[in-house]
Image (cartoon, helix red, strand yellow):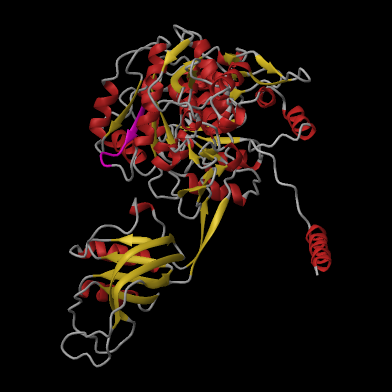
């Protein structure tokens, strides 16, 4: 059963949509209170219910500001939660069938939302306006009364001088820039300050390269390449085409407001101890580095570092991180899975069938859904929309959980032209698809819809074929960190699947798999064990042995890169029995026992191979007693070398001479000289 959702208030919005109270009651385990004009004629009913301070969910988002204001007036301590059951459900050509969908949306809205930690960005209003002509100066004139303006014109900078100097105008071309809102650092070549004696054309003094400038805001009106990757996501960096006056004005208005203290979510929670980036200066996992669109992630020794000031919250690093070192916080992976759980269980218990989960973001997806509801047929009754902060934040754990909970299909609503690279999401889909296909769900369960047109969105949703959900849907409640909930979700997906096979081959780069070795070439040096960041490769304190725990392997590749014999290969796959399987022995050999104390100290084949290469073939090992030293453990080797005065270089060391020796020799020589005389 779905969890009790507290008090539910739903409104037919002046009878523009039907309300199936029975279906909502079955799905949410709560008796809903219905209304017709909750935000107008029946506002007193809301006021009375809100004053009770019991958990309250209202099926309306349009009037959420009004309801929140009334809740504050009546002294309500806990927040009111809101669900959109109108545009997302009731305003549809299939409105009569949307009772289970409304139950699902209300249930999802009741899931708790934990606060997200934030960081502060301080901007003192110093702005650098980069341009190529008078447009940059015009922008400076618009901002001079609000910000501390400096204008930088690219060479040759042939512009007329100002009648009154109200802000500095200089010549130069930005070579590179780094930083964020409130803390930009710009390197400028061919930099020169304007001459106050300029007459017809602005003249400049002597030029110099690598000039440095610090500012809080950058307004780029050059029309050239952006100064930053994923420039639209860099806080404090504004860019507009200088040939478009409207775009320039919009950028100026945005810049004018960038003064003061700004709060920004700390999107990523990061644990350096779990990172598998590098060991001993050998690089392993680079998934997050490859995907970050803003270059907020940089190598830092054995791990990486994430600059929260630059991070734009796309979440691709967290979705791809195989160890759970990086996890998303808006919301966390387990919180998102609980929302999916509440939605799909409520939908099923309310009588809904074959649900399609439509994932979207608010800036792009919500307007499309709204337009479809107001001017078209609305969403189909079995399509359950769920808003995310970023589409690229979704990882494999949420996809596995959705299908385990009973989703029939999943679609990601993307922009026709994404704001940033979405290759991380496409990799996640490419990883999930063979798992779902291998477990008997069949192809086509998960895909993207890339459109900005609500009619094309509806077309794509209607084209999804009818597909049955998991025959044994799960109801587990996810708890814990990213890696733990991922393993749990996959286990539950396997249990719920139509054809729960044991092993499924995965594409290269998958975070699961086996390690295979060429046993003939392996010398059991165990360098791979010391390099493995997750403990998937292990030795044995008692015997020369290399063991492997597949459930711990994240296919970072450090073992392969570290192995001096190049005998290690990675095999991407998912073994659903790996969590219960004992460590597998990859290679085992007999130990070599010390010929003096009988203590095992090495690998027998290795010691024998060394002896065969040295005995009688190297000048240091022409004597049997020297060969015997190789056959001894460390302690015995030192003892024998001391007892027998063995010279490690094959010859007797000269006797150590001291000052007393030289003094005695000198005295002896004097005595001999005197006797001679």
Q: Is residue 6 visible?
A: no
Q: Residue furthest front?
A: 677
- Which quadrant of the view contains residue 223? bottom left
Q: Residue at x 34, y 82 (%)?
A: 167
Please state the extent of the stretch shown in magenta in the rendering: 411-417
Q: Position of residue 357 (x, y in %)?
A: 40, 25
User: Which residue is located at x 32 percent, y 45 percent?
Assistant: 419
Q: Position of residue 369 (x, y in %)?
A: 33, 35
* Residue sitting nearer the eye, 610 or 355: 610
How many numbered marks have been drawn onto this rendered protein structure? 0
Q: Which residue is nearer to you in this view: 460 or 539?
A: 539
In percent of width and height, residue 506 lies at: 40, 19
Residue 449 magenta-highlighted: no
Q: Quadrant of the N terminus?
A: top right
Q: Left or right: 482 with respect to 179?
A: right
Query: Is the C terminus in the top left, top right, bottom left or bottom right quadrant?
Result: bottom right
Work out whether 274 lies above or below 252. Answer: above
Give the residue displayed 43% in from the left and 13% down from the top.
Answer: 504
Q: Is residue 265 visible?
A: yes
Rendering coords of residue 536 (x, y %): 58, 24
**Is 472 located above or below residue 357 in the figure?**
above
Determine whether, in the image, residue 265 is placed left or right of residue 177.
Answer: right
- Nearest to the observer: residue 132 or residue 204: 204
In the rendered image, the residue lying farthest to the left is 200
Q: Nearer the viewer, residue 549 or 251?
A: 549
């Amino acid at each position: 059963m779905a969890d009790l959702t507290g008090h539910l208030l739903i409104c037919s919005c002046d009878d523009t949509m039907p309300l199936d109270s029975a279906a909502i009651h079955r799905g949410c385990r709560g008796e809903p209170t219905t209304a017709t004009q909750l935000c107008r004629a029946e506002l007193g009913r809301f006021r009375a219910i809100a004053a009770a301070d019991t958990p309250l969910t209202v099926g309306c988002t349009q009037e959420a500001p009004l309801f929140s204001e009334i809740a504050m007036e009546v002294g309500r301590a806990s927040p009111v939660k809101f669900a959109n059951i109108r545009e997302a459900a009731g305003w549809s050509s299939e409105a009569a069938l949307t009772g289970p969908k409304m139950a699902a949306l209300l249930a999802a809205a009741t899931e708790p939302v934990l606060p997200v930690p934030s960081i502060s960005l301080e901007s003192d209003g110093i702005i650098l306006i980069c341009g190529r002509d008078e447009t940059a100066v015009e922008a400076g004139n618009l901002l001079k009364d609000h910000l501390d303006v400096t204008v930088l014109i690219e060479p040759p900078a042939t512009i007329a001088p100002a009648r009154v100097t109200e802000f500095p105008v200089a010549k130069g071309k930005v070579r590179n820039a780094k930083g964020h809102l409130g803390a930009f650092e710009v390197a400028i070549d061919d930099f020169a300050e304007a001459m106050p004696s300029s007459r017809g054309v602005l003249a400049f003094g002597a030029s110099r390269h690598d000039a440095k400038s610090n500012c809080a805001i950058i307004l780029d009106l050059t029309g050239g390449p952006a100064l930053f990757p994923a420039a639209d996501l860099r806080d404090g960096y504004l860019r507009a085409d200088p040939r478009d006056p409207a775009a320039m004005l919009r950028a100026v208005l945005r810049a004018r407001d960038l003064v003061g203290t700004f709060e920004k979510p700390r999107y990523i929670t990061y644990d350096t101890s779990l990172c598998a980036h590098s060991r001993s200066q050998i690089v392993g996992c680079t998934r997050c580095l490859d995907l970050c669109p803003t270059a907020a992630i940089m190598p830092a020794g054995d791990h990486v570092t994430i600059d929260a000031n630059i991070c734009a919250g796309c979440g691709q690093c967290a979705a791809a991180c195989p160890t759970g070192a990086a996890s998303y916080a808006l919301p966390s992976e387990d919180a998102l899975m609980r929302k999916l759980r509440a939605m799909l269980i409520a939908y099923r218990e309310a009588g809904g069938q074959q649900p399609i989960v439509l994932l979207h973001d608010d800036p792009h997806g919500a307007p499309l859904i709204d337009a479809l509801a107001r001017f078209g047929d609305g969403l189909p009754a079995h399509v359950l929309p769920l808003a995310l902060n970023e589409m690229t934040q979704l990882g494999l754990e949420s996809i596995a959980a959705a299908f385990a909970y009973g989703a029939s299909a999943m679609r990601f609503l993307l922009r026709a032209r994404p704001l940033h690279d979405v290759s991380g999401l496409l990799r996640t889909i490419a990883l999930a698809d063979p798992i779902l296909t291998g477990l008997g769900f069949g192809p086509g369960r998960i895909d993207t819809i890339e459109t900005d047109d609500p009619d094309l969105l509806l077309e794509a949703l209607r084209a999804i074929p009818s597909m049955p959900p998991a025959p044994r849907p799960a109801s587990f409640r996810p708890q814990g960190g990213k890696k733990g909930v991922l393993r749990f979700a996959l286990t539950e997906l396997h249990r719920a699947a139509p054809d729960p096979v044991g092993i499924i081959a995965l594409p290269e780069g998958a975070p699961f798999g086996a390690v295979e070795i060429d046993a003939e070439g392996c010398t059991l040096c165990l360098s791979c064990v010391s390099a493995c960041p997750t403990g998937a490769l292990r030795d044995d304190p008692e015997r020369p042995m290399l063991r492997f725990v597949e459930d711990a392997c994240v296919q970072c590749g450090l073992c392969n890169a570290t192995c001096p014999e190049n005998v290690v290969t990675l095999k991407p796959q998912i073994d659903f029995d790996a969590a219960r399987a004992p460590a597998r022995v990859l290679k085992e050999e007999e130990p070599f026992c010390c010929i003096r104390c009988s203590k095992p100290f090495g690998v027998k084949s290795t010691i024998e191979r060394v002896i065969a290469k040295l005995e009688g073939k190297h000048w240091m090992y022409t004597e049997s007693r020297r060969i015997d030293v190789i056959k001894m453990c460390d302690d015995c080797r030192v003892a024998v070398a001391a007892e027998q005065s063995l010279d490690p270089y094959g010859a007797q060391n000269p006797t150590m001479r001291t000052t007393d020796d030289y003094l005695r020799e000198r005295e002896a020589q004097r005595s001999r000289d005197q006797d001679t005389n």
